[in-house]
Image (cartoon, grey):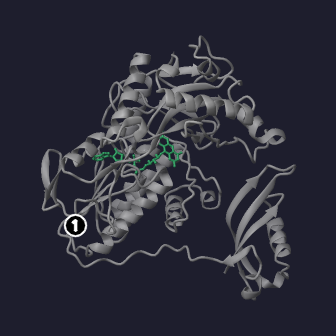
Amino acid sequence: MIRVFQVKCTSEDKSEIEAQLLKKLHMPTKDLLSWSIHRKSVDARSQKIFFSYIIDAKVKHERKYLRHKDVQPRPNEHYQPVSSGTHPLPNRPVVVGFGPAGMFAALILAQAGYCPIILERGSNVDTRTQKVHQFWQTGRLDPECNVQFGEGGAGTFSDGKLTTRSKDSRCRKVLEELVHFGAKDEILIDQHPHIGTDAFMEIIKQCRKEIERLGGMFLFDTALQDIQVKDEKLVSIQFQNQWHPCTALILACGHSAKDTILMLHTHHMELTNKRFAVGVRIEHRQDYINQAMLKEYAHDPRLIPARYKLTHMASNHKGVYTFCMCPGGYVIPAASEPKHTVINGMSYAKRDGINANSALLVQVDESDYGTKILGGLAYQENLEAKAYQMADGYAACCQLASDYLDHKVSTSFGSVQPTYALGTKFVDLNTLFSSPINQALHEALEVFEKRVPGFISSGAILSAVESRSSSAIRIARNEQGMSSIFGVYPSGEGAGYAGGIMTSAIDGIHSAEKLIEYFEKPQYNL
Ligand code: FAD
């Protein structure tokens, strides 16, 4: 099999794709035995829209075609399960957290016959959805079950973007499993695949059912409370106020489980500070974004709703970037702690909301919060508590982008109406952030307005505070994938090894593989 890059077509028509493939390789029809699309992307930068395909093809005279500069042998992307190790595993492995990392760690363990126990502090996805909607309607927050915590993890109420720059071969495994659990199979070929919060919830349930079918066991509303360590080895864990023997534990608790991180710190687990980012959500009308990005194609159903991605290096050496853009989406209350305001974005599978939103973030490091360990977590927490105080509740701290640049508290919204469910309070966001953050944000906004006219002047709204885009710490892990406490495998975003649904899922697989490679396949009597 060969992989052919840059097969450019003006339509998605199969006969045109085949014709272009033959033309590109100067190939007679009889040499082409079969073909399929590996990836599709749309290019609307020139006068015409182009669909650019990567095609996998079975051909006669393969060596001849491999001489073409855009042709490579097709890599084997079939997932290869790892072999079991030889060290005894007296108790079932435990996975803490059922976000993307925990989901895929548990799935791989279950598929390999390790029958994991999954502890999830939040509720199952149906109960969780009710609790999240209750918060969005009434402001009554459940600190154990919310947008960050509960079955499916932080990505459940999200845009469900699956884009990643990772070249990890486990990517394909993740996408195939998602399709197996109900995602549309176009995610296998789209360059910018996304699922949407509504579709993602069903997928999570199917994944849980499969893990149960393979012998896994779920304990919802059950947090890992403490661990017992002897000679730097994990010996037992506490949940439901009781101690249980435990030899191997995959810790996939996400970046918001501060209590869990503090607990691990008291057991001297090796942690380091990590660069992260804070900022605002910027909200525009989607029709403006379509126009600004796609120009004459702004109404083309094949291309809308449009996305954007912008970056700027500020003169104070702080990187500023847009992140997790949600076309046709909603700005959502995403707090997990009482009296802390956290903002994020999500969209439904159809992405048909009136507004577009995106995080607009500034990098934060030890120059902002000092070198004390866990200083980043404290910095994040202070900012979230300050935002809550400024709005006198869970309302979003809001300002028109133009007023932010003029240090002026806004008095009304313009053409963009906010989508945030818990109301808005006009504040001067310059008083929320430190001056290095403000300086970087001001510079970036001015640059972005020049690059994309209207980025500020179209009535864009800033809402704060967007503080949970990545983990503020990293948990050290060794060659065996374990932390400084033997038997604990830190995994996913909270451990500092991933950023987003795909990379967290990939890291979950990686952790499960490390556990399997070390420990013998158990013989449990279920
Ligand atoms: P999490 O998803 O955070 O899962 C951790 C789980 O552990 C949680 O369910 C939590 O309840 C549980 N837990 C924590 N502590 C304990 C404990 N002590 N005991 C038991 N359970 C515990 N990324 C994208 O790639 N695309 C997007 O479109 C996107 N949109 C997002 C929108 C929102 C609103 C949010 C909040 C995030 C979004 N992200 C998105 C980021 C993405 O969700 C995360 O990168 C990803 O979920 C991290 O996966 P994880 O498994 O490492 O951790």
Residue in the foreground of this view, choosing between 351 and 343: 343
Establish if 395 lies above or below 290: above
Secondary structure at badge 1 equals: loop
Q: Which quadrant of the rendered structure holds the C terminus?
A: bottom left
Q: Where is residue 385 in the image (x, y as percent from the top left)?
A: 37, 25
Apparent side of residue 175 relative to residue 1 in the rendered image (left or right): left
The one of 416 and 229 positioned closer to us in this rendering: 229
All told, the count of numbered labels is 1
Amino acid identity at mark 1: Leu
Q: Which of 160 and 131 is in front in this view?
A: 160
Residue 41, position as x, y percentages in the image: 71, 57
When asked about the image quadrant of residue 110, the answer is: bottom left
Please indicate, yes or no, whether residue 390 appears anywhere in the rendered image: yes
- Ligand 1 neighbours mark 1 (CB distance < 8 Å): no
| Res 419 visible | no
Please state the horizontal and vertical placement of residue 216, each as a whole percent of the image: 30, 61
Q: Which residue is drawn at 50% across and 55% down?
A: 502
Which residue is found at the position 28% from the left and 45% from the top?
261
Other residues around mark 1 within 10 Å, as few (<14) / some (14–19) / many (≥20): few
Q: In which quarter of the image is residue 373?
A: top left
Q: Is residue 421 left or right of residue 283?
A: left
Q: Mark 1 points at which residue?
A: 526
* In the image, farthest residue toward the top: 411
Residue 314 rendering spot, x and y as whole percentages:
59, 37
| Res 115 → quadrant | bottom left
- On screen, residue 101 above or below 138: below
Q: In this view, does 41 lie above or below 479?
A: above
> The N terminus lies in which quarter of the figure?
bottom right
Q: Which residue is drawn at 80% across and 63% down?
A: 8
Question: Residue at image x 36%, y 43%?
Answer: 150
